[in-house]
Structure formats: C-alpha cells, structure tokens
Image (cartoon, helix red, strand yellow):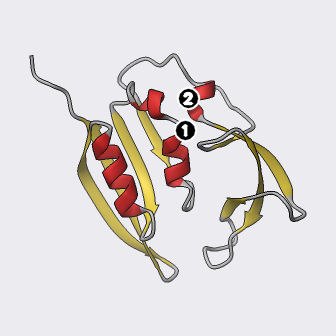
C-alpha cells in the first residue's frame, strides 16, 4: 500500500477540511479555501495512480464528494473491476448514472440511515463483452 497526503477530487488545487455538522463528530468534508482550517492539496486520482494489477476494487466513502472523486478517475475506472461506494440521497442517482455510463452495473445496494439522512452502500461490477 502506498499512502498519499492529498484529497482525491476532479481538480488540482487546495481545499479546506472542516467538520460537517449533522453527520457526527468524525465526519470531515472538503470546502473551498477561505476560512481558517486545515488546507490540503486536491488531486485527481488519475494523476497519482496509473499502474494497477487486476482484479481491482476501489472503495469510496467521501461524505458527499463522490462525484468529484469519480470525475478525477476517468482513466483509472477503465482498469477497475469493482467499485464499492457510499452515496447520499443527493449524490446517489448521479453516481449510479455515471458508473453505468463508464461500463459498470449495479449488483448490490444496501440502504441505511445515518442520523436523519438516507445513505446507500452500492457495489458495481465492470461489464465485459463476451468473446
């Protein structure tokens, strides 16, 4: 395993990590810089991960930042066999559409409530052409 001291996103830049109220004491989220807080570099995963061995699975649990993380891994998704992702009510539909458009199919979904918000844990598998 290799660790990177960056946040994954669909742009290169900086973002502030701050506590997101309403999700619990351990939930952090990214926000545009400007307020006082811990600032981190944001990079697309495509820029830091290029060589992977199959089978490959990625687990994404980023508290509402799912679309940004996926947007920064278009090339990497071509090498992925499985994507496990937690989404919110606000991001779920767009994430499902995005992954289907990139050759995945939804094979399992689990719903649960976190505080007052519905969350979805979804497992996608790459569709392969026969032949």
Identified at 44% across, 63% down, the residue is 91
Residue 59 is situated, as x and y percent measured from the top left of the image, at 47, 44
Left or right: residue 8 versus residue 74 is right
Which numbered tag is attached to residue 38?
A: none
Disc 2 and disc 1 in contact, CB within 8 angstroms: yes
Front residue of 76 and 20: 76
Q: Is residue 71 above or below residue 37?
A: above
On the image, numbered disc 2 is attached to which residue?
46
Residue at the image point whose x is 43% and y is 17% from the top = 53
Instruction: Evaluate whether residue 23 shows in this view.
Output: yes
Which picture quadrant has residue 77? top left
Query: Which of these two is toward me, 10 or 113?
Result: 10
Give the image quarter of residue 16: bottom right
Which residue does the numbered mark 1 point to in the structure image?
72
For the N terminus, the image quarter is top right
> In terms of secondary structure, where does tag 2 sit?
helix
Taking the image as shown, residue 2 lies to the left or right of residue 131, namely right
- Measured from the top left, where is residue 74 in percent x and y? 46, 33
């Amino acid at each position: 395993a290799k660790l990177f001291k960056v946040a994954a996103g669909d742009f290169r830049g900086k973002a502030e990590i701050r506590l997101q109220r309403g999700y619990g004491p351990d939930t952090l989220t990214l926000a545009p810089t400007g307020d006082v807080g811990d600032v981190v570099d944001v990079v697309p995963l495509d820029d830091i991960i290029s060589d992977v061995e199959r089978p490959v699975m990625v687990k994404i649990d980023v508290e509402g930042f799912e679309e940004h993380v996926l947007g920064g891994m278009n090339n990497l998704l071509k090498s992925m066999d499985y994507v496990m992702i937690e989404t919110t009510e606000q991001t779920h539909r767009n994430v499902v559409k995005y992954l289907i458009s990139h050759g995945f199919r939804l094979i399992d979904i689990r719903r649960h409530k976190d505080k007052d918000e519905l969350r979805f844990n979804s497992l996608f598998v790459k569709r392969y052409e026969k032949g």
